[in-house]
Amino acid sequence: MSGNTFGSVFRLTTFGESHGPGLGGVVDGCPAGIPMSEAIIQQELDKRKPGSGKASTARKEADKISILSGVFDGVTTGTSIGFYVENEDQRSRDYSELKDVFRPGHADFSFHAKFGQRDYRGGGRSSGRETLSRVAGGAIAQELLREQGIVLYAYTTELGGIPVEKMDFANASDTPYFSADSNIVSAWDKRIDEVRREGDTLGGVVEIRAVGVPPGLGEPVFDKLDARLAYALMSVGAVKGVEVGAGCAAARSTGSLNNDYMTLDGFASNNAGGILGGISSGQDIVARAYVKPIPSIAKEQQCMHRNGGTVCVRVGGRHDICAIPRINPVLKAMTALALADLLLLDRRLGERQ
């Protein structure tokens, strides 16, 4: 297995490197008749493209999508949907001094150990730019879900150790950092400025919510909805932890407090995050992804040389101060891909019964 394909029925296969000619992918299993256009996908890509926002890299990329197949007259045809985005602003020379160095926090050493060689220009397939293809595929999945009345949100609840004080996920897309609390933005701006001056980077927490998911989605045992969702979110390179519902807080709670009691009006709470026994309950699906700080920092760091010994380097190139908010549409895309796959799997199983 190459690890470049996600999904079993609704499948996304991606290709391309950060400093190669471009990136792209193929979506298989998408039903015919789903509204689709380059503009629909571009809307999501614009949310993650570099060169915008206080925490973003200075790299400028239009990330203009081209649909190569599988769409005709504004709808999907039921065949493979191919897409491609050209790289336009690579500066591979920024990495020439790092070609024999294993940078701290990066995948340099592990890629070298597995393959015996690596693309040192921005990390190749381990680069965050790889997520572009995920967002494009996820945009297609979101249209499929929207046809079923399912809408996704991804909003920031913490940045640089500063959590939000209120939760307004519905309007987060219009707020800097996709913040769930517009009043916290100025504090996050200040923290970003401080860390930038120090030559350092920050992490944060993104919450993902799926509204309108019907009950019964997901499979018992190994293909639980929360297991598939965690797998999807953890496949994003910067994510180091995932919670569903109350998450880790449930371990410090009691059964009487953590249980979501049912009433005639529905569930009284949603500590389960909309998933019971690995199957959707009809409540909102709620998950959180914990995003590590960007490992490329301007501070001098001790690194291991490929031939042995240590050296001190400053990582050049153009990098984000924080993966948030560019990672938000990536996490939303992976959630959409997981839900679309399980939705179509559920339909297929139902047809066989």
Image (cartoon, helix red, strand yellow):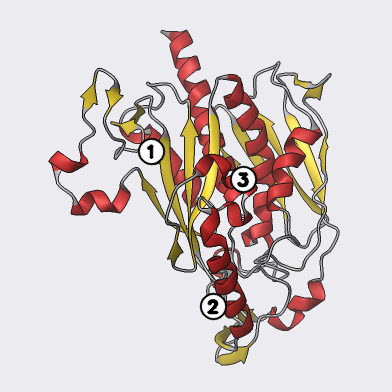
Front in this rendered view, residue 265 or 75 = 265
Task: State left or right for residue 320 relative to residue 41.
Answer: left
Q: Amino acid at mark 2?
A: Pro
Q: Residue at x 69, y 40 (%)?
A: 136
Image location (x, y in percent) of residue 294: 57, 69
Q: Residue at x 69, y 42 (%)?
A: 44
Q: Helix, strand, or loop for circle 2?
A: loop
Whole-Å distance between the Cαs marked 3 and 1? 25 Å
Q: Which residue is mark 1?
A: 226
Label located before the other in sequence (1 or 2): 2
Answer whether residue 327 is visible to the viewer in this image: no
Give the label, 1 or 2, closer to the camera: 1
Name the residue that disc number 3 marks. 173
Which kind of residue does numbered mark 1 sit on? Answer: Asp
Instruction: Give the quadrant of residue 352.
Output: top left
Residue 282: quadrant of the picture: top left
Q: Classify mark 3: residues with Cα within 10 Å, few (<14), some (14-19) or many (20+).
A: some
Question: For this rendering, which residue is in front, 7 or 191?
Answer: 191
Marks 1 and 2, how far apart in space? 31 Å
Q: Secondary structure at mark 1?
A: helix
Looking at the picture, how far across and down is residue 327, in whole percent? Answer: 59, 54
Q: From the image, which quarter does the N terminus lie in?
A: top right
From the image, tell me which residue sits under label 2.
104
Seen in the image, is 258 located left or right of residue 266? Answer: left
Which numbered disc, 3 or 1, marks the residue closer to the eye? 3
Residue 353 position, x and y percent, is 41, 7
Quadrant in the picture for residue 198:
bottom right
Q: Residue at x 81, y 76 (%)?
A: 93
